[in-house]
Image (cartoon, grey):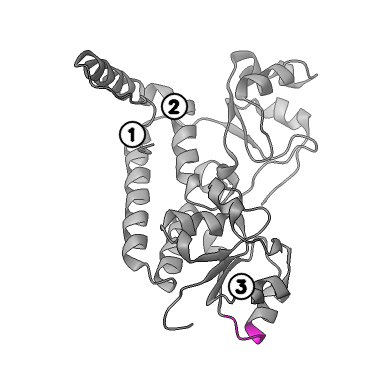
Amino acid sequence: MPAQVNRIVTLAPNLTEIVYALRLEDKLAGDTNECDNPPAAKSKPHVGEPQSPSLEAILALHPDLVLATDSINRVDTVDTLERLGIAVYTAAGDTQTVLGILDSIDKMADLMGAKTQGDELVARFRQRLDALHLRLADRPLAHVLFIVWLDPLITIGQNTFIAVVLSKQNWPQISVEEVLRLQPDYIVFAGGHTQSARTELAVLRQRPVWRDLDAVELGHVVNLDQEAIRPSPGLIDAIEQLARTVHSEAFAKSSQNRNRSNETRFASGLRFKTNAECGLCAR
């Protein structure tokens, strides 16, 4: 590792998000074609796809540090960069849990010379997770089918960070008949699905077997942002969104209090607007 890191190249979308969350975007010399969040990441020089980046493009950016992940990037890419004298940090198996993701963010912040920002960011995320645990501690478990892909039907397994939030195989394929037998309380879409929950529900109600699910009949369909399947800072937002949807009764009182607070602000004549759903994430 160089004594000072001024130029960084990221080889996966979640790593780019971490750099921005740490407010180090000025040090980001380049990222991949898939790095689209935040939107500003699209304007950075691209080095190709995460699984097949251009080594020449990476070297041309003269990075002090390259960030990689073993969940997407190839071992030979990392090995070659290291042989060429480029410092590489690989986020490894520690990103298979939510707390592991936070620890990895902390490590990367330290390597990039941003320990203070890292400590502050991780502390805020831990506080938000602790608040959710406290609010939901006495709530009964909800049975959730988390859909990463619909055709073929792919869900999550015990060695993925999402499983820490919801379940216990990594990305198993299951049959629709098995879903019917399980009768989940909620169906959660994430990743490549860009339709709204209402549209997803309408589609499922037209499909054989799916329309016979209690969750479909009751309208218990949730659509999460792609952040839900990325080990990135946005995962905390996705966890909060899921908690508010699946256990809405646990948040009803606080939502009412925020609504009353908003009404008071409008009544006092202040010229701004607040969103009742943004309390936890401060957006």
Q: Which residue is labeled 1 in the image?
A: 135
Q: Position of residue 50 (x, y in %)?
A: 69, 61
Q: Residues within 10 Å of mark 2 (few under 14, many from 20)?
A: some
In this rendered view, identify the residue nearer to me: 118 or 46: 46
* Sequence-first disc among 2 and 3: 3
Q: Is residue 116 above or below residue 132?
A: below
Position of 202 with respect to 259 (left or right) is right
Q: Disc 2 vs disc 3: which is toward the camera?
A: 3
Would you say the residues marked 2 and 1 are in contact, meaning their CB atoms lie under 8 Å apart? Answer: yes
Vertical position of residue 243 compared to residue 47: above or below:
above
Q: Do tag 1 and tag 3 residues touch (Cβ < 8 Å)?
A: no
**Badge 1: residue crowd in 10 Å (few <14, some 14–19, many ≥20):** some
Residues in magenta, as a range: 82-86
Distance in Å between CA atoms under marks 1 and 3: 47 Å
Residue type at mark 3 is Leu
Q: Could you tell me the amino acid type at mark 1?
A: Arg
